Image (spheres, rainbow, N blue to C red):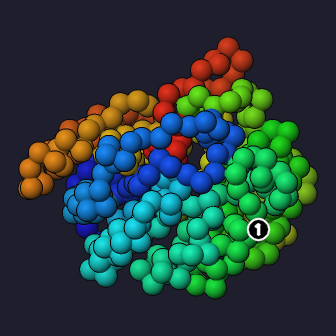
Amino acid sequence: MTQSNMIDPFGRAIDYLRVSVTDRCDFRCVYCMAEDMTFLPKRDLLSLEELDRLCTVFIEKGVRRLRLTGGEPLVRKNIMHLVRQLSRHLKSGALDELTLTSNGSQLERFATELADCGVRRINVSIDTLDADKFHAITRWGKLDKVMRGIEAAEAAGLKIKLNTVALKGFNEDEIPEMLCWAHGRGMDMTVIETMPMGEIDGDRTDQYLPLSLLRTQLEKQFTLTDIPFKTSGPARYVEVAETGGKLGFITPMTHNFCESCNRVRITCTGMLYMCLGQDDSADLRDALRASEGNDLLAETIDRAIARKPKGHDFIIDRRTNRPSVSRHMSVTGG
Protein backbone atom coordinates (compact mmCIF):
# COMPACT_ATOMS: atom_id res chain seq x y z
CA MET A 1 0.00 0.00 0.00
CA THR A 2 1.24 3.47 -0.92
CA GLN A 3 1.99 5.62 2.12
CA SER A 4 0.57 9.12 1.83
CA ASN A 5 3.22 11.73 1.11
CA MET A 6 0.88 14.39 2.48
CA ILE A 7 1.97 14.82 6.11
CA ASP A 8 0.60 17.79 8.05
CA PRO A 9 2.54 19.84 10.66
CA PHE A 10 1.34 17.50 13.43
CA GLY A 11 2.58 14.32 11.75
CA ARG A 12 -0.85 13.18 10.55
CA ALA A 13 -0.86 11.41 7.18
CA ILE A 14 -3.66 12.64 4.93
CA ASP A 15 -5.13 9.63 3.15
CA TYR A 16 -8.84 10.47 3.09
CA LEU A 17 -10.42 12.99 0.71
CA ARG A 18 -13.99 14.23 0.79
CA VAL A 19 -15.17 15.95 -2.38
CA SER A 20 -18.35 18.01 -2.56
CA VAL A 21 -19.51 17.65 -6.17
CA THR A 22 -22.36 20.14 -5.78
CA ASP A 23 -23.69 22.59 -3.20
CA ARG A 24 -27.23 21.88 -4.39
CA CYS A 25 -29.66 19.57 -2.65
CA ASP A 26 -33.24 18.45 -3.16
CA PHE A 27 -33.85 18.80 0.60
CA ARG A 28 -33.62 21.89 2.83
CA CYS A 29 -32.86 20.35 6.23
CA VAL A 30 -33.50 22.94 8.92
CA TYR A 31 -30.13 22.52 10.69
CA CYS A 32 -28.16 22.62 7.42
CA MET A 33 -29.72 25.21 5.11
CA ALA A 34 -31.97 28.19 5.03
CA GLU A 35 -35.14 27.50 3.05
CA ASP A 36 -34.39 30.26 0.55
CA MET A 37 -30.83 29.26 -0.38
CA THR A 38 -28.74 30.98 -3.04
CA PHE A 39 -26.62 28.40 -4.80
CA LEU A 40 -23.41 28.87 -6.73
CA PRO A 41 -23.64 29.79 -10.42
CA LYS A 42 -22.90 26.72 -12.52
CA ARG A 43 -19.97 28.46 -14.22
CA ASP A 44 -18.13 28.53 -10.87
CA LEU A 45 -18.29 24.75 -10.46
CA LEU A 46 -15.51 22.43 -11.47
CA SER A 47 -16.43 20.27 -14.45
CA LEU A 48 -16.67 16.53 -13.95
CA GLU A 49 -13.40 16.20 -15.87
CA GLU A 50 -11.72 18.70 -13.54
CA LEU A 51 -13.04 16.86 -10.49
CA ASP A 52 -11.64 13.62 -11.88
CA ARG A 53 -8.24 15.22 -12.51
CA LEU A 54 -8.18 16.76 -9.05
CA CYS A 55 -9.09 13.49 -7.31
CA THR A 56 -6.50 11.63 -9.38
CA VAL A 57 -3.72 13.98 -8.23
CA PHE A 58 -4.72 13.40 -4.59
CA ILE A 59 -4.76 9.63 -5.17
CA GLU A 60 -1.29 9.83 -6.69
CA LYS A 61 -0.20 11.70 -3.55
CA GLY A 62 -1.46 8.92 -1.28
CA VAL A 63 -5.22 9.29 -0.75
CA ARG A 64 -6.66 5.79 -0.26
CA ARG A 65 -10.29 6.63 0.53
CA LEU A 66 -12.48 8.98 -1.46
CA ARG A 67 -15.97 10.09 -0.47
CA LEU A 68 -18.29 12.07 -2.74
CA THR A 69 -20.62 14.44 -0.92
CA GLY A 70 -22.79 17.47 -1.64
CA GLY A 71 -25.27 19.01 -1.07
CA GLU A 72 -26.75 15.83 -2.46
CA PRO A 73 -24.13 14.32 -4.79
CA LEU A 74 -26.63 12.36 -6.86
CA VAL A 75 -28.43 15.51 -8.05
CA ARG A 76 -25.30 16.63 -9.93
CA LYS A 77 -25.94 16.20 -13.66
CA ASN A 78 -24.13 13.16 -15.13
CA ILE A 79 -22.61 12.34 -11.73
CA MET A 80 -22.37 8.65 -12.61
CA HIS A 81 -19.87 9.54 -15.35
CA LEU A 82 -17.53 10.83 -12.63
CA VAL A 83 -18.14 7.80 -10.41
CA ARG A 84 -17.36 5.47 -13.32
CA GLN A 85 -14.19 7.39 -14.16
CA LEU A 86 -12.98 7.32 -10.56
CA SER A 87 -13.68 3.59 -10.30
CA ARG A 88 -10.59 2.93 -12.44
CA HIS A 89 -8.51 3.70 -9.35
CA LEU A 90 -10.30 0.90 -7.49
CA LYS A 91 -9.49 -1.51 -10.30
CA SER A 92 -5.83 -0.46 -10.33
CA GLY A 93 -5.54 -0.83 -6.55
CA ALA A 94 -4.54 2.82 -6.10
CA LEU A 95 -7.74 3.47 -4.14
CA ASP A 96 -9.08 1.29 -1.33
CA GLU A 97 -12.58 2.75 -1.23
CA LEU A 98 -14.90 4.96 -3.24
CA THR A 99 -18.06 5.86 -1.39
CA LEU A 100 -20.61 8.62 -0.93
CA THR A 101 -22.94 10.27 1.54
CA SER A 102 -26.51 10.71 0.32
CA ASN A 103 -29.92 11.75 1.58
CA GLY A 104 -31.29 8.66 -0.14
CA SER A 105 -33.68 10.49 -2.45
CA GLN A 106 -31.96 9.37 -5.67
CA LEU A 107 -30.79 5.90 -4.61
CA GLU A 108 -33.72 4.10 -6.19
CA ARG A 109 -32.41 5.40 -9.52
CA PHE A 110 -28.66 4.96 -9.04
CA ALA A 111 -27.99 2.16 -6.50
CA THR A 112 -27.40 -0.61 -9.05
CA GLU A 113 -25.00 1.51 -11.10
CA LEU A 114 -23.11 2.61 -7.99
CA ALA A 115 -22.54 -1.02 -7.06
CA ASP A 116 -21.47 -1.77 -10.64
CA CYS A 117 -18.83 0.97 -10.32
CA GLY A 118 -17.27 -0.67 -7.29
CA VAL A 119 -18.97 1.35 -4.55
CA ARG A 120 -19.38 -1.08 -1.66
CA ARG A 121 -20.89 1.06 1.09
CA ILE A 122 -22.72 4.34 1.43
CA ASN A 123 -23.91 6.61 4.22
CA VAL A 124 -27.55 7.66 4.18
CA SER A 125 -28.57 10.68 6.26
CA ILE A 126 -31.94 10.27 7.94
CA ASP A 127 -33.09 11.89 11.18
CA THR A 128 -36.52 10.40 11.81
CA LEU A 129 -38.71 7.47 10.75
CA ASP A 130 -41.89 9.54 11.16
CA ALA A 131 -43.05 10.65 7.69
CA ASP A 132 -44.57 13.93 8.89
CA LYS A 133 -41.55 14.85 11.00
CA PHE A 134 -39.27 13.84 8.13
CA HIS A 135 -41.07 16.23 5.79
CA ALA A 136 -40.94 18.95 8.44
CA ILE A 137 -37.20 18.70 9.08
CA THR A 138 -36.20 18.29 5.42
CA ARG A 139 -38.86 20.80 4.31
CA TRP A 140 -39.09 19.08 0.91
CA GLY A 141 -38.27 15.40 1.48
CA LYS A 142 -40.55 12.38 1.31
CA LEU A 143 -39.69 9.49 3.62
CA ASP A 144 -41.25 6.80 1.40
CA LYS A 145 -38.94 7.79 -1.48
CA VAL A 146 -35.90 7.51 0.79
CA MET A 147 -37.08 4.12 2.05
CA ARG A 148 -37.39 2.87 -1.54
CA GLY A 149 -33.86 4.14 -2.10
CA ILE A 150 -32.56 2.23 0.91
CA GLU A 151 -34.29 -0.92 -0.31
CA ALA A 152 -32.75 -0.47 -3.77
CA ALA A 153 -29.30 -0.02 -2.22
CA GLU A 154 -29.74 -3.17 -0.12
CA ALA A 155 -30.89 -5.10 -3.20
CA ALA A 156 -27.79 -3.91 -5.07
CA GLY A 157 -25.59 -5.26 -2.29
CA LEU A 158 -24.48 -1.91 -0.91
CA LYS A 159 -23.70 -1.81 2.81
CA ILE A 160 -25.52 1.11 4.41
CA LYS A 161 -24.66 3.17 7.45
CA LEU A 162 -27.34 5.48 8.79
CA ASN A 163 -26.26 9.00 9.77
CA THR A 164 -28.58 10.75 12.23
CA VAL A 165 -28.16 14.28 13.56
CA ALA A 166 -29.28 14.33 17.20
CA LEU A 167 -31.66 17.27 17.71
CA LYS A 168 -33.00 18.29 21.08
CA GLY A 169 -36.76 18.24 21.27
CA PHE A 170 -37.08 16.67 17.83
CA ASN A 171 -35.69 13.14 17.62
CA GLU A 172 -33.92 12.37 20.91
CA ASP A 173 -36.79 10.11 22.04
CA GLU A 174 -36.88 8.39 18.66
CA ILE A 175 -33.21 7.40 18.46
CA PRO A 176 -33.65 4.06 20.34
CA GLU A 177 -36.32 3.04 17.83
CA MET A 178 -34.14 4.12 14.91
CA LEU A 179 -31.22 2.19 16.35
CA CYS A 180 -33.26 -1.02 16.58
CA TRP A 181 -34.63 -0.46 13.07
CA ALA A 182 -31.19 0.08 11.55
CA HIS A 183 -29.53 -2.83 13.34
CA GLY A 184 -32.49 -5.04 12.50
CA ARG A 185 -31.71 -4.45 8.81
CA GLY A 186 -27.98 -5.03 9.22
CA MET A 187 -27.12 -1.34 9.07
CA ASP A 188 -24.74 0.38 11.46
CA MET A 189 -25.77 3.80 12.71
CA THR A 190 -23.92 6.97 13.63
CA VAL A 191 -25.35 9.87 15.62
CA ILE A 192 -23.91 13.34 15.06
CA GLU A 193 -23.95 16.57 17.05
CA THR A 194 -25.27 19.55 15.13
CA MET A 195 -22.45 21.87 14.01
CA PRO A 196 -22.41 25.68 13.90
CA MET A 197 -21.97 26.17 10.16
CA GLY A 198 -23.77 28.78 8.08
CA GLU A 199 -26.77 30.97 8.84
CA ILE A 200 -30.02 29.05 9.15
CA ASP A 201 -33.60 30.10 9.93
CA GLY A 202 -33.30 29.34 13.63
CA ASP A 203 -31.19 29.18 16.77
CA ARG A 204 -28.82 26.23 17.00
CA THR A 205 -28.77 26.42 20.79
CA ASP A 206 -32.38 25.23 20.61
CA GLN A 207 -31.30 22.23 18.50
CA TYR A 208 -28.05 21.23 20.17
CA LEU A 209 -28.07 17.92 22.02
CA PRO A 210 -24.73 16.84 23.55
CA LEU A 211 -24.09 13.21 22.67
CA SER A 212 -22.70 12.62 26.15
CA LEU A 213 -26.25 13.25 27.37
CA LEU A 214 -27.74 11.07 24.62
CA ARG A 215 -25.39 8.22 25.51
CA THR A 216 -26.47 8.43 29.16
CA GLN A 217 -30.09 8.19 28.03
CA LEU A 218 -29.38 5.23 25.73
CA GLU A 219 -27.55 3.35 28.48
CA LYS A 220 -30.79 3.15 30.43
CA GLN A 221 -32.10 0.89 27.69
CA PHE A 222 -29.02 -0.63 26.01
CA THR A 223 -25.65 -2.09 27.01
CA LEU A 224 -23.02 -0.04 25.18
CA THR A 225 -19.42 -1.27 25.07
CA ASP A 226 -16.63 0.86 23.60
CA ILE A 227 -14.84 -0.94 20.76
CA PRO A 228 -11.70 0.00 18.78
CA PHE A 229 -13.53 -0.30 15.42
CA LYS A 230 -12.64 2.54 13.02
CA THR A 231 -13.74 3.63 9.59
CA SER A 232 -11.93 6.41 7.74
CA GLY A 233 -14.13 8.99 9.48
CA PRO A 234 -14.18 10.53 12.96
CA ALA A 235 -16.79 8.37 14.71
CA ARG A 236 -16.06 6.57 17.96
CA TYR A 237 -17.95 3.27 18.09
CA VAL A 238 -19.72 1.17 20.67
CA GLU A 239 -21.25 -2.26 20.31
CA VAL A 240 -24.90 -2.55 21.36
CA ALA A 241 -25.33 -5.88 23.15
CA GLU A 242 -29.10 -6.07 22.70
CA THR A 243 -28.98 -5.61 18.89
CA GLY A 244 -25.51 -6.90 18.01
CA GLY A 245 -24.89 -3.81 15.89
CA LYS A 246 -22.48 -0.88 16.05
CA LEU A 247 -23.35 2.68 17.02
CA GLY A 248 -20.99 5.54 16.24
CA PHE A 249 -20.78 8.93 17.96
CA ILE A 250 -19.47 11.97 16.07
CA THR A 251 -18.89 14.62 18.71
CA PRO A 252 -17.30 17.78 17.32
CA MET A 253 -18.66 19.81 20.21
CA THR A 254 -18.34 17.70 23.36
CA HIS A 255 -15.26 15.63 22.48
CA ASN A 256 -13.58 16.70 19.29
CA PHE A 257 -11.81 14.17 17.11
CA CYS A 258 -9.08 16.41 15.75
CA GLU A 259 -6.04 14.61 17.11
CA SER A 260 -6.38 11.79 14.58
CA CYS A 261 -7.72 13.83 11.64
CA ASN A 262 -6.58 12.22 8.39
CA ARG A 263 -8.82 14.09 5.96
CA VAL A 264 -9.23 17.20 3.88
CA ARG A 265 -12.20 18.49 1.92
CA ILE A 266 -12.66 19.99 -1.54
CA THR A 267 -15.68 22.06 -2.53
CA CYS A 268 -17.35 21.89 -5.91
CA THR A 269 -15.55 25.13 -6.84
CA GLY A 270 -12.13 23.66 -6.08
CA MET A 271 -11.52 25.22 -2.67
CA LEU A 272 -9.47 22.94 -0.43
CA TYR A 273 -10.40 23.14 3.26
CA MET A 274 -7.87 21.58 5.58
CA CYS A 275 -10.37 21.67 8.48
CA LEU A 276 -14.19 21.59 8.48
CA GLY A 277 -14.30 24.09 11.33
CA GLN A 278 -11.78 26.65 10.07
CA ASP A 279 -12.00 29.16 7.23
CA ASP A 280 -8.44 28.74 5.94
CA SER A 281 -8.52 27.33 2.42
CA ALA A 282 -6.53 27.01 -0.80
CA ASP A 283 -7.84 27.70 -4.29
CA LEU A 284 -7.12 24.61 -6.38
CA ARG A 285 -9.29 25.73 -9.29
CA ASP A 286 -6.82 28.43 -10.37
CA ALA A 287 -3.94 25.97 -10.11
CA LEU A 288 -5.97 23.36 -11.99
CA ARG A 289 -6.77 25.72 -14.85
CA ALA A 290 -3.36 27.43 -15.04
CA SER A 291 -1.72 24.60 -16.97
CA GLU A 292 -2.37 21.21 -18.48
CA GLY A 293 0.28 19.66 -16.22
CA ASN A 294 -0.24 18.95 -12.54
CA ASP A 295 2.98 20.33 -11.03
CA LEU A 296 1.47 23.64 -9.91
CA LEU A 297 -1.59 21.83 -8.55
CA ALA A 298 0.59 19.43 -6.55
CA GLU A 299 2.64 22.33 -5.14
CA THR A 300 -0.52 24.19 -4.12
CA ILE A 301 -1.80 21.09 -2.33
CA ASP A 302 1.53 20.63 -0.51
CA ARG A 303 1.55 24.24 0.69
CA ALA A 304 -2.02 23.87 1.98
CA ILE A 305 -1.35 20.60 3.83
CA ALA A 306 1.65 22.30 5.49
CA ARG A 307 -0.73 24.67 7.27
CA LYS A 308 -3.45 22.21 8.28
CA PRO A 309 -4.50 23.31 11.78
CA LYS A 310 -4.47 21.13 14.86
CA GLY A 311 -8.24 21.36 15.25
CA HIS A 312 -11.44 23.35 14.94
CA ASP A 313 -12.98 26.02 17.18
CA PHE A 314 -16.65 25.01 17.12
CA ILE A 315 -18.77 26.42 19.91
CA ILE A 316 -22.53 26.58 20.52
CA ASP A 317 -23.87 28.52 23.46
CA ARG A 318 -26.22 31.41 24.19
CA ARG A 319 -23.45 33.99 24.04
CA THR A 320 -22.22 32.79 20.65
CA ASN A 321 -25.20 33.32 18.40
CA ARG A 322 -23.22 33.37 15.15
CA PRO A 323 -21.98 30.33 13.18
CA SER A 324 -18.36 29.35 13.85
CA VAL A 325 -17.84 29.43 10.08
CA SER A 326 -20.01 31.28 7.60
CA ARG A 327 -20.24 28.62 4.89
CA HIS A 328 -23.07 26.10 5.05
CA MET A 329 -22.42 22.40 5.57
CA SER A 330 -23.65 21.81 2.03
CA VAL A 331 -20.64 23.70 0.65
CA THR A 332 -18.05 21.33 2.10
CA GLY A 333 -20.25 18.28 2.52
CA GLY A 334 -19.66 17.53 6.19
Question: Which residue is at the front of the view, 226 or 141?
Answer: 141
**SS of the residue at dot 1?**
helix
Residue 229 visible at all:
no
Left or right placement of residue 233 versus residue 21 in this view: right
The three-letter amino acid code for the residue at tag 1 is: Asp
Horizontal side, residue 92 vs residue 297: left or right: right
Q: Residue at x 75, y 34 (%)?
A: 207
Residue depicted at x 86% and y 61%: 177
x and y percentages locating residue 266 in the rendered image:
36, 48
What crowding class fits label 1: few (fewer than 14 Cα within 10 Å), some (14-19), or many (20 or more)? Answer: few
- Rendered image quadrant of residue 65: bottom left
- Quarter occupied by residue 306: top left
For the view shown, which residue lies furthest in the top direction?
Answer: 319
The quarter of the image holding the N terminus is bottom left
Which residue position is annotated with label 1?
A: 144
For this view, does 201 lie left or right of residue 44?
right
Picture coordinates of residue 154, whole percent (x, y): 64, 80
Determine which quarter of the picture holds residue 15: bottom left
- The answer to whether residue 284 is visible is yes
The x and y percentages for residue 7 are 27, 47
